Amino acid sequence: MIDKANFRLKRAGENLVIAIAQHYETKEVLMVAFMNEEALRRTLETGKMHYFSTSRRKLWLKGETSKHYQVVKEVRIDCDGDALLFLVDPLGSACHEGYNSCFFRRLEDGELKIFKEKEFDPERVYK
Amino acid sequence: MIDKANFRLKRAGENLVIAIAQHYETKEVLMVAFMNEEALRRTLETGKMHYFSTSRRKLWLKGETSKHYQVVKEVRIDCDGDALLFLVDPLGSACHEGYNSCFFRRLEDGELKIFKEKEFDPERVYK
């Protein structure tokens, strides 16, 4: 699997693939981020989503602070290997802003509107 | 909308956002690619998905050759604005290899397996 991934995106000194997390039951797209080879290896080994944070320049276990882990149910790869799709069981909310998905705003009549309810208070979770 | 997008990915001399196409009914993730500002503007103006091809370094109307256009039904943006999620009605298949989705391979017992049927013959569509 790891040898089939095409880490062709270069950011923050790392070679990366795009990693999309999709809810395995509702099929909602929860978030999209990046993985380097180590993040992908740890994700496959542990069954929990690990990303590479390009802003913090480090490996990032999703849920390490919030406990909102994402448990991997299925792994798919796209035709050119530079994007992976993970069907996950999210133990909590994907978004650090308190929503189940990072895609909590949509275009309505030319304006971006929040169309979701907050599931938690970020101030309480990320002190 | 365009002013809220964060074109922070730099590739092929362009500033880009990640663009995910998801089937508006089945919720299947069809493909992921990039958009520059012009691709996003044309997508919003025409209601058909336009991407920026980083390999061909040009604007790309999805379906310009295959006629497999993707008609936009809803547009979402993520918390930091560098990824857009488009719910689309695909007029045909997303993948140039003939499958409805570019994610036609998944991990099974440590091996990547094709789990979808081809919908068209690429040789006939892309001469």
Image (cartoon, coloured by chain):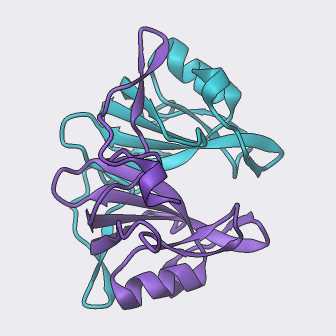
Chain colours: A purple, B cyan
Q: Is residue B20 left or right of residue B7?
A: left
Q: Quadrant of residue B67?
A: top left
Residue lying at 62% horizontally and 27% vertically, measured from the top left: B4
- Hey, which residue is sitting farthest top in the picture? A109
The percent position of residue B72, horizontal first and vertical second, equals 38, 24
Instruction: Name the residue at 69% across, 52% down.
Output: B55
| Residue at 48% over, 55% down | A32
Q: Say left or right for A11 vs A3.
A: right
Assign the N terminus of chain B to one quadrant of the image: top right
Kindly tell me whether residue A73 is visible in this rendering. yes
| Residue placed most toward the observer, A55 or A110 | A55
Residue nearest the viewer, comparing A75 with A118: A118
Answer above or below: position of A96 versus B83: below
Q: Furthest residue to the left? A: A25
User: Toward which corner of the image does residue A70 lie, by quadrant?
Assistant: bottom left
Q: Residue at x 30, y 74 (%)?
A: A72
Say above or below: A117 vs A121: above
Image location (x, y in percent) of residue A117? 29, 35
Residue A87's place in the image compared with B7, above or below, is below
Q: How many marks?
A: 0
Looking at the image, the residue that sits furthest to the right is: B13
The percent position of residue A119, horizontal first and vertical second, equals: 29, 46
- Given residues A96 and B69, the one toward you in this image is A96
- For residue B20, above or below residue A31: above
Q: Is residue A96 visible?
A: no
Percent of width and height locating residue A127: 53, 60
